[in-house]
């Protein structure tokens, strides 16, 4: 069973408290954003996704297109 550290209050437990939870509760707490850290268990060190390149830089954003010069409406 995974051990976690809470990021927010849960079941009367203060943030920073270490808890042992089951996999279903781990998923629910992760969904709610209440986990600060997974200390041990299957989700402690998730493997990187093979579909996402890890070291490639992000593409720069394209420059905004300039409006054509012309007469302005009033």
Image (cartoon, rainbow, N blue to C red):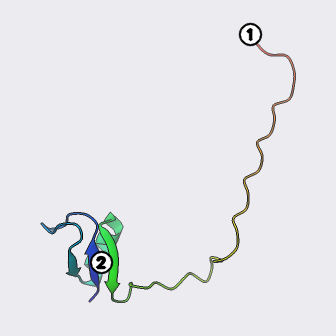
Q: Quadrant of residue 17?
A: bottom left
- For label 2, the SS is helix
Q: Residue most toward the front?
A: 16
State the quadrant of the N terminus.
Answer: bottom left
Label 2 vs label 1: CA separation?
A: 60 Å
| Residue at 33 percent of width and 71 percent of height | 36
Q: Earlier in the sequence, mark 2 or mark 1?
A: 2
Task: Name the residue that disc number 2 marks.
Answer: 26
Residue 57 in the image: above or below residue 68: below
Figure disc tally: 2
Q: Quadrant of residue 54?
A: bottom right
- For label 1, the SS is loop
Q: Measuring from the top left, give residue 27's x and y in whole percent.
A: 33, 75
Q: Measuring from the top left, give residue 10's x and y in whole percent.
A: 19, 66
Residue 74, disc: 1
Q: Residue most toward the left?
A: 12
State the quadrant of the C terminus.
Answer: top right
Viewed as shown, does residue 23 lie left or right of 66? left
Viewed as shown, does residue 65 lie left or right of 13? right
Q: How crowded is the residue under tag 1: few (<14 C-alpha within 10 Å), some, or many (20+)?
A: few
Viewed as shown, does residue 12 lie left or right of 24? left
Q: Measuring from the top left, give residue 41's x and y in whole percent.
A: 33, 89
């Amino acid at each position: 069973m995974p051990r976690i550290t809470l990021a927010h209050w849960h079941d009367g437990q203060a943030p920073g408290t270490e808890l042992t939870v089951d996999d279903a509760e781990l998923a629910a707490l992760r969904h709610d954003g209440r986990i600060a850290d997974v200390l041990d268990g299957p989700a402690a060190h998730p493997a990187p996704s093979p579909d996402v390149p890890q070291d490639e830089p992000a593409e720069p954003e394209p420059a905004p297109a300039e409006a054509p010069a012309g007469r302005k409406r009033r």
